[in-house]
Structures are given as C-alpha cells and as structure tokens.
Amino acid sequence: MENCQKGKLYELLIRKAFKCETGGRHGAKASLFEKIIFNELNGNENINNDRMPPAFRFNKVKGYVGSALSKLARTKKYLHSEHEFPPIKQKLRSAETTDDLLVIIKLSLKKINECEDVLRDRNNKKGKSSA
C-alpha cells in the first residue's frame, strides 16, 4: 500500500469520528501520517528539519487516533455491543510503529463499516415494515 493511501485511511478515520473536513483541529490531515511514515523509513531522523521531532510527531498522531477512538466509543450509532471501540483503543497503547497504527486504523474503519451496515439493515427493515 502506498504511503499516501495509508495517510488517506488515517484521515478517513479522523473525519468519520469527528465529522470534520480535511485539516481540521482533530488532525484530519493525511500528510501527518505520511510524514511519520517517511521519518520511520529514514531511521527517524529529522531530515526535513521540522520543528517537531519524529517521536513527538508520532505521539501526536497516535493521540489523534486515540481521540478518534474515544469519540467513536461515545457516538450513539456505534454503541452496539458487538462493535465496541475500547478494545481497539487498548491495542493503541502498545503501538510503536506506523504499521501498528495502520492495523488499528484499518480495524477501526472495519468496525465503523460494520456498524453502518447494521444501521442500514435496520433502517431498510423499518422502511419495508411501514410500507
């Protein structure tokens, strides 16, 4: 998977959790994830002379993912017992690489899709029964 695609998955998770646009205050910017991938590929050296050291940037992105998971756990439409986000957030604590984060992001997006499918099915059944 290309780095920009990985960044887009990260951004999608943040945007779905906070219902925000790209570049919002919740870290909904694919380039944030892409930069930590780039840093990791280059031995976590601060090649671009960013003001933010690579470890700080990684923890910042990890924090944005954690905030998104917390938000999803409190969002009414995702509260189905079989689709809880707290266990995923537990895994986030031990994430040390972008690959670890990517696994968590993909799992979270999968759970979101499962929840949305359940809701869509329920709404379709309600619509058919009232017709």
Image (tube, rainbow, N blue to C red):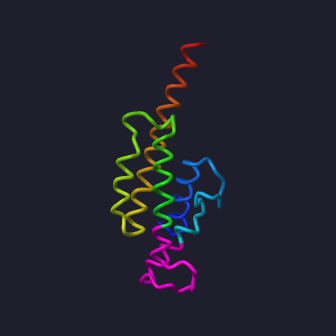
On screen, residue 25 versus residue 42, left or right, reads right
Residue 50 occupies quadrant:
bottom right
Residue at 44 percent across and 79 percent down: it is 41
Which stretch is magenta? 35-59
**Image x and y of residue 107, in percent:** 41, 51
Q: Which image quadrant: the C terminus?
A: top right
On screen, residue 68 versus residue 90, left or right, reads right
**Image x and y of residue 112, in percent:** 48, 44
**Image x and y of residue 6, in percent:** 50, 64
* Front-most of residues 97 and 124: 97
Residue 35 lies, with reference to residue 9, above or below; the image says below
Residue 124 lies, with reference to residue 21, above or below; the image says above
Q: Is residue 99 magenta?
A: no
Residue at 53 percent across and 31 percent down: it is 120
Residue 51 occupies quadrant:
bottom right
How many labels were placed on the picture?
0
On screen, residue 85 versus residue 28, left or right, reads left
Q: Is residue 38 magenta?
A: yes
Residue at 50 percent across and 84 percent down: it is 46
